[in-house]
Amino acid sequence: MSWTSWEPVKGFDFSDILYEKKRHLELEGGIARVTVNRPHRLNAFTAETMDEMFHAFYDASHDSRVGAVILTGAGEHFGAGGDVEWEEKELRVHVYWRFPPNQLLRACRKPVIAAVKGWVIGGSHHLAYMCDFTIAADTARFGQNGPRVGSPADGYIVAYLTRVVGAKKAREIWMLCRKYSADEALAMGLVNTVVPFDELDAEVDRWCEEILRLSPGCVEVLKASFDADIDYLAGQWGHQSRMLYPDWFEGAEVREGQRAFIEKRTPRFWRVRNVEADLQQEFRERVLLELGEEQGS
């Protein structure tokens, strides 16, 4: 079985990603590859990265010659999630994702394969587990990082992990921020298979060959059917946490986590929480005192 070489897609000149396609000479179908190309930041992404990925995924999704899309990272790592330094800066001016990262996968009509290696952390981690398939190199290390750095995440992207590994393990992954080896990820169902690092690309090609042997229309319908579960989760009060904690997502705790990460120190979350508790206590005592004075008069 033989493939053409990867070629950059004309008209898509990006700064943060590489967008390529190649075709299988015997099966006649093609595949696309989106590579986050920020190895100097461990492939952590910003809104600009997501904007570029949107255009690439949109093109691949609507190209009838493409049967699958590969999502990966340049160099030795898949990705370290959202760029915390960018998030800390943009939080001050209330600039967020113009297109939510995981919606790229939901909107894509073609099956998406995450080819992961090295760090698969935070936002990059839930991008990987929300792909249709996840193929891991033995160097991959998985985990969430939000509570560690005060980086907020909520809604269906959190809940969907229960569909992948079960409720108990999903809560462990998100709420304890442990790190897991490729073999541990395989055992819990977080990935489909694990191969040596230098065999990752060949293994992904083999999976793509299997996909291209099948009816592309049927595969697209099946993907849409599975993805309907995401729509269900998104519609079941997926963002009620923002209703319950409207101020937290832009509050002092988030800023402390981001600044601690940038300053390379341990965040002092409970110091922030205790200051807030003292202020609340002072407010309550003042209100009670004023009420008492009014009643006495």
Image (cartoon, rainbow, N blue to C red):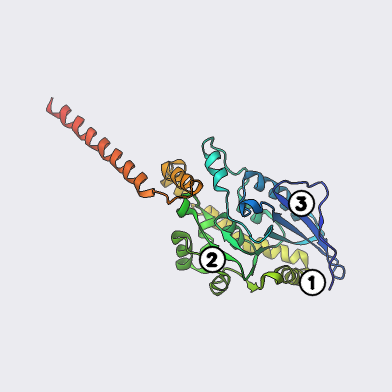
Q: Measuring 78% from the left and 68% from the top, which residue is drawn there?
A: 212
Query: Position of 45 compared to 217: left or right?
Result: left
Q: How many marks?
A: 3
Determine the residue located farthest toward the front in the rendered image: 264
Q: Residues within 10 Å of mark 1 (few under 14, many from 20)?
A: few
In the rendered image of this protein, does residue 137 appear above or below residue 39? below
The type of residue carrying mark 1 is: Arg
Comes first in the chain, label 1 or label 3 = 3
The type of residue carrying mark 2 is: Arg
Determine the residue located farthest toward the top in the rendered image: 297
User: Spatial distance from mark 2 to mark 1, Cα to Cα?
Assistant: 28 Å
Q: Residues within 10 Å of mark 3 (few under 14, many from 20)?
A: some
Give the numbered dot on residue 18: none
The type of residue carrying mark 3 is: Asp
**Label 3 sits on residue:** 59
Q: Measuring 59% from the left and 57% from the top, which residue is drawn there?
A: 124
Give the numbered dot on residue 163: 2
User: Spatial distance from mark 1 to mark 3, Cα to Cα?
Assistant: 22 Å
Q: Measuring 64% from the left and 56% from the top, which residue is drawn there?
A: 106
**Tag 3, which secondary structure?**
helix
**Tag 2, which secondary structure?**
helix
Q: Position of residue 215 (x, y in %)?
A: 78, 68
Q: Position of residue 271 (x, y in %)?
A: 35, 46
Q: Which quarter of the figure is the C terminus placed in?
A: top left
Give the numbered dot on residue 213: 1
Query: Position of 3 compared to 14: left or right?
Result: right
